[in-house]
């Protein structure tokens, strides 16, 4: 282990010094072997973690990144990891999760892909999440037709089993746009990912409204 310590002024406080052991030796952007340039530091409130902004010395890269150091003892801090940003996950209502736990799981994988700029695949995943939601919902409504619903195309399922015109309208269009993300040829050139997400949101809303309406209807006769 490289025992060289880096003495760093923390939070502009001239009385606190920290010995930082080791710099990360690979740039998270260009993945070249590097000795990074120190830029600035931040001691977190609890004083057990220091975050250091480092710069890649590779002139073609020249990008900053943040390294995390944990306190071992006294003023000694050891390199732990490069800080990665967390992604947001979406939590749906209990009515939706009860119908299809898989929907929330797949939707959030799509959302993760979107937040990581994987735009070529997130639409496909959003479409898949929608298919799970609709099929699980229809299986709940028509348990005797489970096998048929599983085997049939989602479009056929919507056509033959969805009566509510609002749900029919939004879910069909969501599938049309979702298919655009799956197939080689795009049909809806003026529509984008945001339109697909809006249609999924509307489909979720109609299903929620339907389930809640039935719940109140059953409990207040
Ligand atoms: Zn680099």
Image: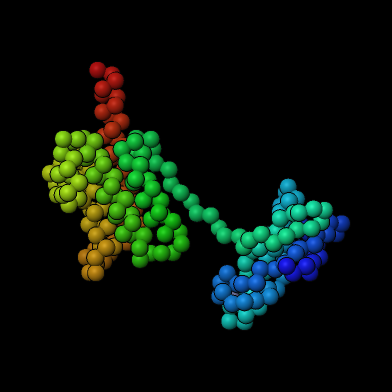
Query: Does the image show residue 197?
Result: yes
In x, y percent, where is residue 44? 71, 52
30 relative to 157, above or below: below
User: Is residue 93 or residue 165 the one in the foreground?
Assistant: 93
Quarter containing the C terminus: top left
Quarter containing the N terminus: bottom right
Q: Residue at x 72, y 49 (%)?
A: 45
Extreme residue in the right direction: 15
Q: Residue at x 62, y 80 (%)?
A: 58
Query: Does the image show residue 163?
Result: no
Extreme residue in the left direction: 160
In x, y percent, where is residue 96? 34, 39
Q: Residue at x 20, y 46 (%)?
A: 150
- 213 left or right of 28? left
Quarter of image, res 8: bottom right
- 218 left or right of 76? left
33 relative to 112, above or below: below
Extreme residue in the front direction: 1
Quarter of image, res 70: bottom right
User: Is residue 209 or residue 10 the one in the foreground?
Assistant: 10
In x, y percent, where is residue 155? 17, 51
Question: How many labels, in total?
Answer: 0
User: Is residue 123 or residue 2 the one in the foreground?
Assistant: 2
Extreme residue in the top direction: 221
In x, y percent, where is residue 166? 22, 42
- 54 left or right of 95? right
Q: Residue at x 48, y 51 (%)?
A: 88
Q: How is the image coloured?
A: rainbow
């Amino acid at each position: 282990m490289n025992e060289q310590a880096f003495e760093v002024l923390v939070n502009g406080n001239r009385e606190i010094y920290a010995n930082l052991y080791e710099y990360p030796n690979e740039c998270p952007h260009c993945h070249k072997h590097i000795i990074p340039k120190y830029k600035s530091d931040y001691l977190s409130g609890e004083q057990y973690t220091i975050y250091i902004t480092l710069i890649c010395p590779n002139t073609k890269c020249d990008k900053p990144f943040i390294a995390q150091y944990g306190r071992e003892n006294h003023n000694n801090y050891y390199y732990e990891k490069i800080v990665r940003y967390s992604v947001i996950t979406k939590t749906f209502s209990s009515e939706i999760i009860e119908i299809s736990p898989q929907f929330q799981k797949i939707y959030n994988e799509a959302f993760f892909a979107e937040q990581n700029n994987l735009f070529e695949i997130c639409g496909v995943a959003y479409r898949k999440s929608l298919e799970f939601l609709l099929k699980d919902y229809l299986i709940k409504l028509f348990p005797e037709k489970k096998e048929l619903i599983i085997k049939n195309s989602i479009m056929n399922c919507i056509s033959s089993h969805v009566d509510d015109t609002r749900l029919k309208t939004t879910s069909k269009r969501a599938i049309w746009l979702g298919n655009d993300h799956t197939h080689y040829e795009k049909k809806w050139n003026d529509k984008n990912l945001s339109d697909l997400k809006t249609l999924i949101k509307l489909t979720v809303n109609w299903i929620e409204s339907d389930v809640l309406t039935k719940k109140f209807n059953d409990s207040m006769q």
